[in-house]
Image (spheres, rainbow, N blue to C red):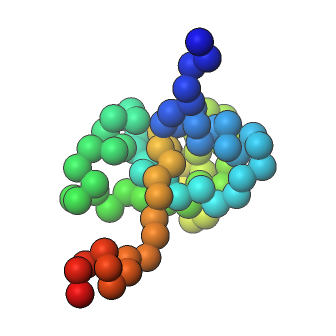
Amino acid sequence: MDKKLTGSDLTRAMLKRGDQQIWCAVEDSNDKEAMADQMNNDFTARIVSFNDNSFFCTGGVAWSFAVPIKISAMTQDDVKF
C-alpha cells in the first residue's frame, strides 16, 4: 500500500509539482504543533518555496514545518443566516 502524503511532506510534494502560494499552518517544532489549536494560532502563511530544509512564505520568513490548509470565504448558509 502506498503511503499517503500528509503535513509538510504534502507541502513539499505540492511545491515540487509546481503549486504556488500554498496556504499552510506553520511552526518550527513539528506538524502536530502547526495544526494544534488553530483558534489561537495566528501562524498561517502562503508558502512559496522549500530550500535548505526550510519552507519560505511570501514574506520571506523561513519555517521548519508547513501543513497545507483550506481557507475559504464563509457563506450565508455556513452561518445559518
Residue 71 in the image, given as x and y percentages of width and height: 45, 65
Position of residue 18 relative to residue 5, above or below, is below
Q: Residue at x 46, y 53 (%)?
A: 69
Give the position of the C terminus as an image quadrant. bottom left
Viewer-proximal residue, 33 or 72? 72
Q: Quadrant of residue 10?
A: top right
Residue 75 in the image, given as x and y percentages of width and height: 38, 81
Number of numbered tags placed on the structure image: 0
Judge whether residue 74 can be spotted in this image: yes
Position of residue 61 relative to residue 63, above or below, is below
Q: Residue at x 31, y 39 (%)?
A: 33
Give the position of the N terminus as an image quadrant. top right
Tell me if 26 is positioned left or right of 17 in this view.
Answer: left
Q: Residue at x 37, y 57 (%)?
A: 43
Judge whether residue 60 can be spotted in this image: no
Residue 68 in the image, given as x and y percentages of width and height: 51, 48
Tell me if 31 is positioned left or right of 80 in this view.
Answer: right
Q: Residue at x 32, y 79 (%)?
A: 77
Q: Which residue in the rendered view is the most extreme toward the top?
A: 1
Tell me if 4 is positioned left or right of 19 in this view.
Answer: left
Residue 29 in the image, given as x and y percentages of width and height: 37, 34
